[in-house]
Each structure stands twice: as structure tokens, then as C-alpha cells.
Amino acid sequence: MVSFRATLLALASAAIVAADYYIDPTSVDLLTRRAWCSDELSNCPIICQQTSPGTVLANTCDPETLTYGCVCSNGLQPNMSEFSLTLPFHVCQQWVIQCRNDCGINNACAASCAEDHPCGAQEPKRVNTTTSSTMPATGTAGSTGPTVFNGLGEGATSSPKPAGNAAAPALLQFGSAYGLVVVAAGMIGGFAVML
């Protein structure tokens, strides 16, 4: 009979994944690679909580080879390259640095390294969200204006800037009039205590 520990070890070794971008591990000092693995080990459980409750089944990171494994309690592996402060994020950033260095003085090449190879969360999926019927939407699709995130996992909506907010000027006038009175009273009180 196969033990639970042997099964978990086999699962963890099957889950070991190399980072999406390849860099020679020895091109980065070991202390930095250990910090990258520390980030990976810290973020795996947090990322897994987004999709499945419970303890992660595997959470490994090898700073010598820059390989990692993260298996959530539901048996699935999250795509760690979609998140920041994970091993793939750090390796990607280092890859961009090395790419830029390889470009020399060719500015177009150096710009292409970062623009064509973004690292970390670009458009993260919000999997553990709830909606509320008490909070109105911030705008409608297709409207113009600045982008507003409503925080309900609905993505971004655009809404035009309001023409004016009548309460804002009144609040500013109140603050400027009574703020000076509060500061003056504080100074007078301070002088009274000193005497």
C-alpha cells in the first residue's frame, strides 16, 4: 500500500514547474534567488485561497534550479505567471533586464524587451468575489471618461466626470473657515499652558 507521504511527494515532484522565461540560475546571486523563493512560498497559499479552501497540497521552490511547485487543495495548479511576487514574476523581470543588457545601445530593442514581455499581473482574474445589489454600477459600457473599478469583480466601467459637485465647494469653505479657528484655538491653548 502506498503511503500518503509518498503520494504527496510524487504529487509535489510532478507539480514542479520551471519559470515561463528561462534565465541561467547562476546569473543571479543565490541570496536573491532565495528571496524569490521566499516570495513564491509565501504567495502560493494566498493564491490558492482564491480558488479552494484548505491547505495547499504542495508548495516548493528550489533557488538552485529556479523551479517551483504549487498545488492547491483542489489538486489544481494556479498559473503563477499571472501574479506578481511569484517566482515566474521575478524570473521574468530578470529576463527583461538581461534582454535589455543584450540590446546594448539599441533603444528600440531595449524598449521591446519590456513592452513585448510584461511580467506579473496584467489583467488578473477575480475568482473569489461577491456581488451586491445595494451598490449601483459606476457607469455603463461604452460611456466616455476615466476608468472606474467598482470592486465587485465586474471589471472596469467608464463613467463621465460629473459636471460639478455642489457639496464639494461648500465642504471646502467650511474647512477653510473653521479649520483656521481650530488651529488658532490650539495655539492659544498651547500658550496658556506654557504660562
Image (spheres, helix red, strand yellow):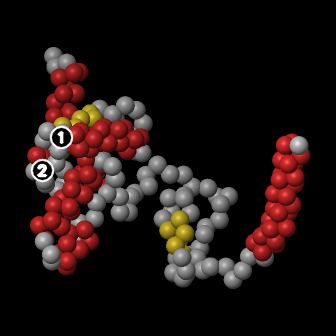
Residue on which disc 1 sits: 30
Q: Judge by depth and name the residue closer to the eye, 60 or 188.
A: 188
Left or right of 55 on screen, residue 166 = right
Write down the quadrant of residue 55 in the picture: top left
- Furthest residue toward front: 195
Query: Is residue 24 visible in this depiction of the protein?
Result: yes
Q: Judge by depth and name the residue closer to the eye, 12 or 63.
A: 63
Residue on which disc 2 sits: 27
| Residue 79, image x, y percentages | 28, 51
Which residue appears at 20% of the width and 33% of the height? 12
Marking on residue 84: none
Left or right of 57 on screen, residue 9 = left
Judged from the image, the secondary structure of the residue bearing numbered disc 2 is helix
Q: Judge by depth and name the residue closer to the eye, 137 or 117.
A: 117
Q: Work out which quarter of the rendered image holds the C terminus and state it.
A: top right
Which residue appears at 19% of the width and 72% of the height? 110
Judged from the image, the secondary structure of the residue bearing numbered disc 1 is helix
Which residue appears at 20% of the width and 69% of the height? 113
Query: Is residue 68 visible in this depiction of the protein?
Result: no
